[in-house]
Image: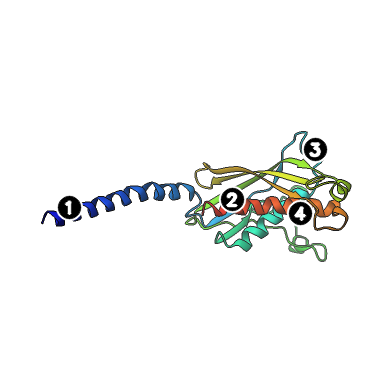
Amino acid sequence: MILNTLSRSCIALLFSCAALFAAPQTMAQQSTRKLAGYTVIVVEKVMVEKNSATEDFPKGMDVVLQGQLLIKLRDSKMFDRVLDGSAVVEDSAPPSSQGPGKESSPASNSEKKEGEAPAAKAEKPASTEKQIVLQSTVIQFEKGSRAARYWGSFGAGQSKVKVRYRLKDKQTNEEVLAFDKQGTFKGMLSSFGGSQDEALIKAVTGAAKALLTELAKHR
């Protein structure tokens, strides 16, 4: 009897210890899943911080980064919907350019250059969907050197793009996550160290890939 009682007590104690050990781990896992429940991500227009570290950042590469973020987020299937927040929302028709008291005719409204795409419209997520907003700012850029990549030692002449990412809850505007990620191009597998265009695009693409790696930790 005494042995049976002691055995039951020991088993109960072991279960209690196991529960106490598992509880902090479960809480830690929940605290890292900050993006759990979000089904829509809105990718706002990429910005470039004005400072001495970005003054050489090529014009138009922010658009390339925007495109890479959209492509990679959609390919990842991490969210049900990935929306382009940089698109223009057409809530009303533009004012007439024919002067006061004159209305444009249906024909003139429908006229557009041959092959010209219609103005982009931002998708509006359903109100029931939990949305997260992605804000991206280029904060540092190093052009690198093709010659240094080709002739130099490992790591020489790298092209680098550092981006500051912020994710905010769409409804409350509260910051959920914030971090910096860097994309690099070393040119090790490219002919003669790779062209400058290749270096820029791959560095920007690397910054977009780094975002997904971080987001996956919080899903």
* Residue 22 percent location from the top left of the image: 36, 51
Residue drawn where x is 67% and y is 60% of the image: 71
Q: Name the kind of residue labelled 3 in the image.
A: Glu
Seen in the image, is 107 located left or right of residue 26?
right
Which residue was labeled with disc 4? Answer: 202
Q: Name the kind of residue labelled 1 in the image.
A: Leu
- Cα separation between marks 2 and 1: 49 Å
- Structural crowding at the residue carrying mark 4, measured as other residues with C-alpha within 10 Å and reported as few (<14), some (14–19) or many (≥20): many
- Cα separation between marks 3 and 2: 27 Å
* Residue 53 percent location from the top left of the image: 76, 36
Seen in the image, is 40 located left or right of residue 183?
left
If the image is split into quadrants, where does the N terminus sit? bottom left
Chain-order first, disc 4 or disc 3: 3
- Cα separation between marks 1 and 3: 74 Å
Q: Are marks 4 and 3 in contact (CB under 8 Å)?
A: no
Secondary element at image label 2: helix
Which residue was labeled with disc 3? Answer: 55
- Structural crowding at the residue carrying mark 3, measured as other residues with C-alpha within 10 Å and reported as few (<14), some (14–19) or many (≥20): some
| Residue 102 can be seen in this image | no
Chain-order first, disc 1 or disc 4: 1
Q: Name the kind of residue labelled 2 in the image.
A: Glu
List the single residue furthest toward the top: 52
Secondary element at image label 1: helix
Of labels 3 and 2, the one closer to you: 2
- Structural crowding at the residue carrying mark 1, measured as other residues with C-alpha within 10 Å and reported as few (<14), some (14–19) or many (≥20): few
Chain-order first, disc 4 or disc 2: 4
- Cα separation between marks 4 and 2: 18 Å
Which residue was labeled with disc 2? Answer: 214
Residue drawn where x is 78% and y is 46% of the image: 155
